[in-house]
Amino acid sequence: MALVDLVMPKMGESIMEATVLKWHKQPGDTVEMDETVLEIATDKVDSEVPSTAAGVVKEILFEVDDVVPVGTVIARIESGAAAAESAPAVAAVAEPPKPEPAAAPQPAPQPVQPAASAASVAPSAGNRFYSPLVLNIAAKEGISMSELENIPGTGSEGRVSKKDILAYVKNRANGAPQATPQPAAPQPAPAPTPQPAAPQPAPSASAAPAASSTADYGSNVEVIEMDRMRKLIAKHMVNSKATSPHVTSFTEADVTNIVNWRNKVKGEFQSKYGEKITYTPIFIEAIVNCIRRNPMINASVDGDKIIVKKDINIGMATALPSGNLIVPVIKNADTKNLLGLSKDVNGMANAARNNKLKADDTQGGTFTLTNVGTFGSLMGTPIINQPQVAILAVGTIKKRPMVMETEHGDVIAIRHMMYLSMSYDHRIVDGSLGASFLTDVANELEAFDVNRGV
């Protein structure tokens, strides 16, 4: 028998904590490899946490609604052939530690080692992602956090994969003594486990004054408590305005060619590819082309450093059934044609509407598009989706009489017009770049080829 720690996974570079929504397993329950143990919620999306081992759940260290830092041990699973037979005993043993997670070191040193190693990931790992599987292997093999950070990764964005860490373990077989210091780490393990959850009431504490002034609302009112996602959205919006000095520029575009082309080909496009063609992938295609010419828009700020992103990942603000907004991300949009963008846009929108988005679907965005025209707005002043430095809003498309220059003189014609607005971070995006980029997007849309094929 062996005890395996299940840790709170890191769902993305900007996510440092998650809330426990629901436990699917309780102490004494059997669990299979990759079977869902609990549901968690981050500030991006809700997701399921699978088991990293087959066996019996020995203990659960956090309750529903607890906020837990990534890398923290949230449950322990007893794996091995004897685990099923000892399930009743496990449930009994799990009871005493439940009120006091600090008593967790009571078992053999093995379960404590992963706790210390995993708990140290949150403050030490920076933005590098470690999967629960990699963290468990590191803990079992006595690999310190400093060692783990120095292991070259062959995964996406330099992440350490299972293959990488197993190769490292094999190569350091004669360095086993390094595992000895690990048992000394139980001291920090209990502290990070329950403690980080305690500071979390701070945000809700900021809401306390509003709650305490309920008597001032008067009698003819309805008081509605914000749901979890609305609280997170509110927090992000306030943080974004506090972080970035927002400037918004406006322009308009004649999108008559786009409207006429879409009306002409939408039936053929759907019958040929099985996908609806909407305006969103056309807008994304134009934005991508302009980002190639203006790479400083595709950036973020880290202190006094400007981080220019080479990947172009376009977020698209999408309404959820609850009325809240979420921003799924079209990864590597610059590598996809209009069909590929259409498939991604339709797939992400459907997943959002059916609450099927995965945590990774909302990660890694470098620029965001929001369509305020969906709700009938002519234009908007969007708030930057941190840590990006710009967000572009498109308004509703309206027919308007416009003056057009022709070789025979000026004429008035009915055209399909659309306002565009872009908010940008004035720390690194000056008015010249912001306005130039926005004008470039408008020109790109107006230059759309009405004779383009499908």
Image (spheres, rainbow, N blue to C red):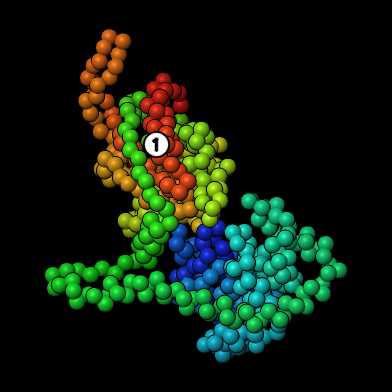
Q: Is residue 323 visible?
A: yes
Q: Position of residue 271 (x, y in %)?
A: 42, 32
Taking the image as shown, residue 318 lies to the left or right of residue 210, namely right
Q: Residue at the location (57% across, 65% down)?
A: 9
Q: How many marks?
A: 1
Give the SS element for disc 1.
Answer: helix
Q: Residue 308's x, y, as percent?
A: 55, 44
- Taking depth in this image into account, of 426 and 232 the one nearest to the observer is 426
Q: Identify the residue at image location x=69%, y=62%.
A: 149
| Residue where numbered disc 1 is placed | 435
Give percent across and percent down for residue 294: 50, 36
Q: Nearer the viewer, residue 337 or 102?
A: 102
Q: Residue furthest top?
A: 408
Report the residue that reaches farthest toward the left. 220
Which three-letter amino acid code belongs to the residue tagged 1? Ala
Determine whether, in the image, residue 164 is placed left or right of residue 359: right
